[in-house]
Image: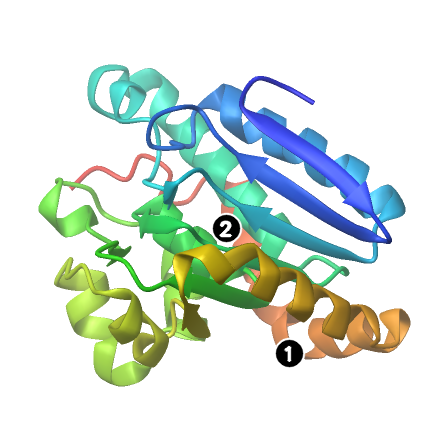
């Protein structure tokens, strides 16, 4: 697939693995590779599992661009928003098997999937944009309001609090936490469970639940609203 992302499909379950050898940042190349993997998975798989490298799922946008190349920021954030909207509104069940940190855009990635499994390590989840001088774009707010438990919303969204996997379950970034050596086993169990659902009914009901939010995210992205993300 690419040096950054691999995609394997077996028995109707696609496993897409992000591994840039570092923080799995949403660079332009990484996002293009994920989209290419999704193209392949959507064409032939029933369920999609996204996972990362040891210790990290995704630690946000490529800060080298975000901090030093202002002209490219709207395009980077826009492409990230389009990818997250694609995941959020996808007709296929999408499971995240997170081996570690999900921070900033990585936190939004956690909010976009249908089911999220983390590991019981010292990893952290959250939206730390207030700590790094960025204002989240509208699609970030949409995902946060949709998924984060209300009592955690202020501290995680504006307060930039990074939380443990156990707290992330209560807050809405994760659905469950397992031992690190059981992560992919549990992800495949969940994928097989979701594979038994009627695919057309799942897609229709998912659209009923998420369609309005996904449409708003797409409209805001099309308008370019909030893509400079400057404080």
Q: In the image as oriented, which residue stretches furthest toward the bottom?
A: 151
Q: Can residue 216 be seen in this view?
A: yes
- The quarter in which the C terminus is drawn is top left
Question: Marks 2 and 1, how far apart in space?
Answer: 19 Å
Q: Badge 2, how many Cα within 10 Å: few under 14, some, many 20+?
A: some
The residue identified by callout 1 is 209
Mark 2 or 1: the one toward you: 1
Give the residue displayed 44% in from the left and 24% down from the top: 20
Q: Toward the viewer: 231 or 109?
A: 109
- The quarter in which the N terminus is drawn is top right
Q: Can residue 138 be seen in this view?
A: no
Q: Toward the viewer: 158 or 6?
A: 6
Estimate the x, y position of residue 5 in percent, counting from the top left: 59, 28
Q: Quadrant of residue 38?
A: top right
The residue identified by callout 2 is 220
Estimate the x, y position of residue 117 in percent, counting from the top left: 48, 65
Q: Badge 1, how many Cα within 10 Å: few under 14, some, many 20+?
A: few
Give the residue displayed 20% in from the left and 42% down from the top: 134
């Amino acid at each position: 697939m690419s040096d950054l992302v691999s995609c394997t499909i077996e028995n109707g379950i696609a496993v897409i693995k992000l591994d840039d050898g570092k923080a799995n940042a949403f660079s332009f190349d990484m996002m293009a590779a994920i989209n290419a993997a999704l193209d392949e998975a959507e064409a032939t798989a029933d369920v999609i599992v996204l996972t990362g490298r040891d210790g990290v799922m995704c630690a946000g946008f490529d800060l080298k661009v975000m901090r030093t190349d202002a002209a490219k920021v709207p395009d980077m954030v826009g492409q990230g928003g389009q990818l997250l909207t694609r995941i959020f509104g996808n007709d296929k069940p999408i499971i995240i098997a997170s081996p570690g940190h999900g921070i900033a855009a990585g936190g939004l990635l956690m909010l976009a999937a249908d089911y999220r499994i983390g590991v019981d390590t010292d990893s952290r989840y959250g939206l730390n944009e207030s700590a790094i001088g960025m204002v989240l774009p509208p699609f970030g707010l949409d995902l946060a309001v949709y998924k984060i438990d209300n009592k955690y919303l202020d501290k995680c969204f504006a307060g930039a609090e990074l939380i443990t996997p156990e707290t992330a379950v209560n807050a809405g970034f994760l659905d469950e936490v397992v031992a690190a050596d059981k992560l992919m086993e549990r992800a495949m169990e969940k994928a097989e469970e979701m594979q038994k659902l009627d695919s057309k009914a799942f897609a229709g009901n998912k659209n009923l639940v998420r369609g309005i939010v996904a449409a708003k995210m797409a409209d805001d992205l099309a308008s370019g609203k909030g893509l400079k993300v400057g404080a």
